[in-house]
Image (cartoon, helix red, strand yellow):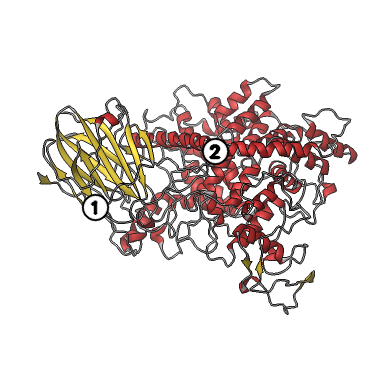
Amino acid sequence: MKRTRIRAGEILGVVVSCLLIAAVRAETNAPSVTASELPRDAVRVEIFEGLPDQLSWNFTNPPVSETYTEPTFGFVVLPTKYSAKGIKTDRKAPFLFRASARVILPKGEQRLLLRVRTGARLFLDGKQLFTVKFPSLASDGHEEVPEVPLPLGPEVRYLRPGQGEAIATVQGDGAEHILVMETIIGLKERRPEIGELTVSLAAKDAEMFYVLCPEGGPRVALSDESWSRYEEERRSFHARGDLERRRKLATSEDQYWAMRHNRARAQVSKLPPVKIPSVKNEAVQNDLDRFINAKLETAITKPAPLLDDYAFLRRAALDTVGRAPSVEELNQFLGDSAKDRRAKAIDRFLRHPSWADHWVSYWQDVLAENPGILKPMLNNTGPFRWYVHEAFTDNKPMDRFVTELILMEGSAHYGGPAGFGLASENDVPLAQKAQIVAQAFMGMQMQCARCHDAPYHDFKQRDLFSLAAMLKRAPQEVPLSSSIPTNANIVIGRVVNVTLKPGTKVEPTWTLTNTMPDELAAGVLRNAKDSRERLAALVTDPGNQRFARVLVNRLWKQYLGQGIVEPVDDWETAQPSHPELLDWLARELVTHDYDLKHVARLILNSHTYQREARPDSGGDKPEQRLFAGPTRRRLSAEQLVDSLFSAVGKKFDSEEMNMDVDGRRPVKEFNNLGTPYHSWEFTSLSNERDRPALAMPRAQMISDTLTTFGWRESRQGAQTVRDDSPNVLQPAAIANGLLANGRITRLSDDNALTAVATRSDLTLPQLTRETFLRVASRLPTPDEEKLFASYLREGFDSRLAVSEPTTAKARKATRPVSWSNHLHPEATRIKQEAERAARAGDPPTQRLAPAWRERMEDAVWSLVNSPEFVFLP
């Protein structure tokens, strides 16, 4: 035996080289795995939860809590754990991750490469090859920045930040052997992440390692390109598996909600029916139009003309999936018969996975989802964004969605509804949550009642604290910080009264009996003593007609620009413009199992929605809101940025939303929100301004654009309507900003328009039309086609320079800057280099002659900067 070198940048550990027949000391708790218990074509993974929280292997394994299979020894993500209700929950940490498989080692000297984030060990036929030591879990920010890891081959993927690697050489014999890899995850309250966990194999003199797998498994090279494809495939696989698993687990919960919905339908059937008006203009698409047209006829106002097909599809795509339609979606739409193409397109969009992505950003604002990635404090929540995403992916009934949110069960730090319950450094966190629930789902603005009786509403301070006590499941004391002096003599319209003295303990009782009597049908509550469950039931009960009305009104405002009731989150002094329509939509929601997509389909299919937008709102008073056409709307920040990237087929290519990349700090101090693929996945990138080494320059340029257009990087308070007032920064951001100029309009090799422009059989009219379809979702007018042709004709025939991409992003190692070393001067220098590279933008393609390429970039720039791009049709 001999010791091999420890690679620079790895987690320190002793690496042993040995012959297969050599005896190596085994740990006392070495795994006992036999070939007969393993599948022939897959790697078996076992998870053992609830290990002692210690940096050693000296323990007795608990029972296996979970078993599944992977195709290789390349592990990208863990399957999500769900409760019996299908809600994301946490594994009991720390836990042991064990992967075992039958593998064949080719004859001759072979190298086994282990890449891992934390302590690990590798066994071959029951003999321990090596142990990788546990890393230090303490860091103060002043450590040295590790050197670039030594390359293992010209195309081998560099070691990722926060990872370590170790190698053992073995003499292969061409026979089958049992390989077992173990690592411990989630020690000392660290995030339960596996990073890029791999075991790879290469012959002695080979330049490429391949991820080890059973015979016949996929051949995955440990290169950037091959690993990236494999990683994307495994993430998609596990996302599908998560969906199937949570739906299967929630079967009994489904039965409970089926009972609730049957009762709701029965209760609605006892109400007087809503009369659908008859109208002179029978050119209506559905009954919804009759309510609108009846008021238009009374006001002697004509409805706006219908949109053309291209404008309709762009609007529908933006409103449902949050981005402009792709060329493929346009072609499919135009290929359908004119009679039903709009209805078919609406159905496709409602089935699209991005339906969930589009709704997350809305509820992040409404529910004040506010996870920080740098030492979260001051009203920060957990990242329950993933719960919202799963709920809309599963199309959960809205009463069930709200109930689960109020119950606040599951994971608090990793994406369960329990994250909604967090409000760090808040004197009464559940009073804040009570205000959000009342505002979001009952249209009750109770914010003022936090410190005194509301001056403009009839809410008393006791009303809010009673709700807080119901959420707390215990009496809620009024702190001194949540009160004003009783002798303050403040007058805001009327005298501000304080009816609760500091120190008063408010009981968990329902006081909003004017909205919903404190009466629930037998069988609704599964735990009658749980005040939190009672609150959820009272909010969502069909007897609380405010709930369904508030939800459909929110949806109506999203699609038409104004609510039937305005403001949508403060109903106490508001009147509906179309009360019968509001009731009709609310009953459609209730009688169709609170399915938001059902009401969305009704609205989207209506002529009311499909009419041309009006530049004015029609007025703030109920009688002035006629909805002759939707209100002119600007794209939300998320719609704008997601549409920019989808138009040119680029990925965000952003840094991970994580400032503790080596995972050495507790989760309470650092969140990891993952690598963003949609705008809703970003968060505040604040690094306190004096810590440039924590900067994320590629993410920052996206975040800056989002913020310019009204996105809130932090949400310490709930908000339904953003400030979307025009300002000079908005056109400047698109015309001169780094994102638009360095990435979106840059014809790099990963730009979809580069692929179009480099087609050898391309004509100039084809290029113009496809560019317009991609960016503007329509064909160019004859004048536009003529203008573009005149600008792009020069050099068009000689535009092709080389036939193959030559500017693929160069492989380079990244010295891992993290919280553990961010105060070291070298860390700042590294990030400054990264910022210079980000500001330079994506490297332009060499497949096009530079002069003509720049002309084409100008053409794309002009379309992106047109007002048409930033407004819905």
In the figure, 581 relative to 824: above or below? above
Q: Amino acid at mark 1?
A: Lys
Give the residue displayed 29% in from the left and 31% down from the top: 37
Residue wearing tag 1: 133
Quadrant assignment for the C terminus:
top right
Secondary structure under tag 2 reads: loop
Would residue 532 appear left or right of 763 to someone viewing this image? Answer: right
Would residue 712 appear left or right of 501 to someone viewing this image? Answer: left
**Number of dots carrying numbers:** 2
Of circles 1 and 2, which is in front?
2
Q: Position of residue 174 (x, y in %)?
A: 17, 27
Q: Position of residue 791 (x, y in %)?
A: 54, 34
Residue wearing tag 2: 250
Whichever of callouts 1 and 2 sits on the residue coming sooner in the sequence is: 1
Give the residue displayed 75% in from the left and 78% down from the top: 489
Instruction: Write down the quadrant of residue 236 in the picture.
Output: top left
Give the residue displayed 74% in from the left and 57% down from the top: 512
Would residue 8 appear left or right of 401 to someone viewing this image? Answer: left
Q: Residues within 10 Å of mark 2 (few under 14, many from 20)?
A: some
Would residue 697 appear left or right of 276 to someone viewing this image? Answer: left
User: Who is closer to the viewer here, 581 or 802?
Assistant: 581
Q: Position of residue 609 (x, y in %)?
A: 73, 36
Q: Which residue sits furthest bottom?
A: 487
Q: Which mark is residue 848?
A: none
Residue 151 seen in the figure: no
Q: Residues within 10 Å of mark 1 (few under 14, many from 20)?
A: some
User: Who is closer to the viewer here, 519 or 482?
Assistant: 519
Residue 111 seen in the figure: yes
Quadrant assignment for the N terminus:
top left
Give the residue displayed 66% in from the left and 53% down from the top: 535
